[in-house]
């Protein structure tokens, strides 16, 4: 089953969370001032917002399209900062 990998960091270290692709209600991706903002809306009603200044919208869209069309089992968003 395809999943998205998220990285949560605190002062005590980092942990990873995997969200099944089938549990996503929607994915919103926008680019503002050179940064990519992602909002993952889950079917549970939870929303996760992420930010990256290291990746362009075009690069993200290419990676997402490749993930959707391939046999890859997870899409790595660990480089994106989870906004709390």
Image (cartoon, grey):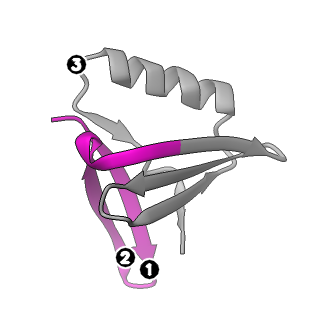
Asked if the residues shown at circle 1 and circle 3 are in contact, with their CB atoms under 8 angstroms apart, the answer is no
Q: Position of residue 12 (x, y in %)?
A: 37, 84
Magenta-drawn segment: 1-27
Q: Position of residue 32 (x, y in %)?
A: 79, 47
Residue ID for mark 3: 71
The relative height of residue 73 versus residue 8 in the rendered view (above or below) is: above
In the image, residue 83 sits, relative to residue 61, either above or below, namely below
Q: Is residue 53 left or right of residue 4?
A: right
Q: Disc 1 and disc 3: Cα gap in Å?
A: 32 Å
Dominant secondary structure of the residues highlighted in magenta in the image: strand
Label 2 to label 3, Cα distance in Å?
31 Å
Q: Which mark is residue 13?
A: 2
In the image, residue 22 lies in the stretch drawn in magenta = yes
Give yes or no for contact between labels 2 and 1 (Cβ–Cβ under 8 Å).
yes
Q: Residue at x 28, y 41 (%)?
A: 21
Which quadrant does the C terminus fall into?
Answer: bottom right
In this view, 7 is above or below 55? below
| Badge 3 density bin: few <14, some 14–19, many ≥20, Cα 10 Å | few
Residue at horizontal 26%, vertical 49%? 23
Going from N to C along the chain, the mark reached first, 2 or 3, is 2
Alpha carbon separation for disc pair 2 and 1: 5 Å
Q: Which of these two is toward me, 71 or 42?
A: 42
* Label 2: element kind: strand
Can you tell which mark lies on residue 30? none
Residue wearing tag 1: 10
Give the number of the mark in front: 2 or 3. Answer: 3
Residue 16 screen position, x and y as percent = 30, 61
Is 7 left, or right, of 59 in this rendering? left
Magenta-drawn stretch contains 10:
yes
Quadrant of residue 36 within the rendered picture = top right
């Amino acid at each position: 089953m395809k999943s998205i990998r998220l990285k949560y960091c605190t002062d005590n270290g980092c942990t990873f969370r995997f969200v099944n692709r089938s549990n996503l209600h929607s994915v919103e991706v926008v680019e503002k001032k050179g940064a990519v903002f992602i909002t993952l809306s889950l079917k549970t009603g939870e929303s996760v917002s992420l930010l990256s200044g290291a990746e362009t919208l075009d690069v993200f869209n290419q990676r997402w399209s490749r993930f959707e069309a391939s046999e890859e089992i997870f899409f790595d968003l660990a480089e994106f900062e989870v906004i709390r």
